Amino acid sequence: MDSHCVHQARMAGVQGWPRGASFFKRLSILNQVPSGSLLLVGKVLRPHGKEGLLRIRSYARSEASFLDAGTVFLRSVSGKIREFRVTAVNAHKNTFLMRLKGLASRSEAEGYKGAEILISKETLVSEEDECFWYELLGIKVYLDTGDYLGSVSHIISAGSNDIYVVREGDKEIFIPATHEVVKEIDLGNEKMIISAMEGLLDLNEV
């Protein structure tokens, strides 16, 4: 993948940046990505029905991310990880319903309430000028004037567009992931350049 991800950023095989203006709706925070070869893509909320279905919160925007991966790993609240084959994922209100091979009853599904859903990095397929969320964590952020703002500490999925949370010391700045604001992402040099748009930093003043 080219080191210059200028126009798109994805989380685990998901579509590129949305182009909306609202950035504080339906906040779902991805505070950190697990180390190693697995990526956090969602969380099990609870069982659904009597046949082993799981109602999940997705950090991706499409069920295609899970189906393309084919296999997911559930990390229970106790820390135990188990691999499952994904057989179906469907949107359900503001969540998804996931069916996994090997979970056939509600009692079996109950054991994974609150579990993290992970996929292997090896299942990710990137397109030209595209990068993934986990690659952006820790990247340094600069204004196009050259001023340093801090580094990306975590990413918020806010419905219409993602938000990059940039931290420097005790200060946090919320940067909407839109083409108008983010001008360049250079993974090779671990640098993001954003536009010094009028009023952008004022919105972050407390």
Image: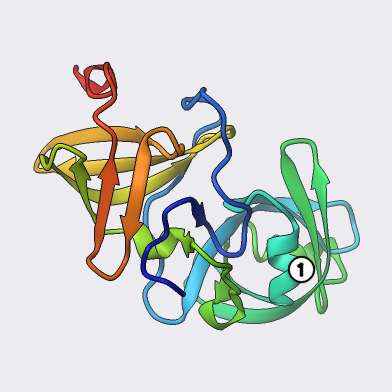
Q: Is residue 25 above or below residue 13?
A: above
Picture coordinates of residue 70, whole percent (x, y): 74, 77
Residue in the foreground of this view, choosing between 68 and 80:
68
**What's the residue type where badge 1 is placed?**
Leu
Q: How is the image coloured?
A: rainbow
Picture coordinates of residue 28, whole percent (x, y): 51, 40
Instruction: Say which element carries label 1.
Output: helix
- The residue shown at (49%, 54%) is 9
Which image quarter holds the C terminus? top left
Picture coordinates of residue 84, whole percent (x, y): 72, 79
Picture coordinates of residue 165, whole percent (x, y): 31, 41
- The residue shown at (40%, 47%) is 155
Residue under pointer 1: 67
- The residue shown at (20%, 39%) is 143
Is 72 placed left or right of 36 in the picture?
Answer: right
Is 117 placed left or right of 140 in the picture?
Answer: right
Is 105 placed left or right of 29 in the picture?
Answer: right
Q: Is residue 76 above or below residue 157?
A: below
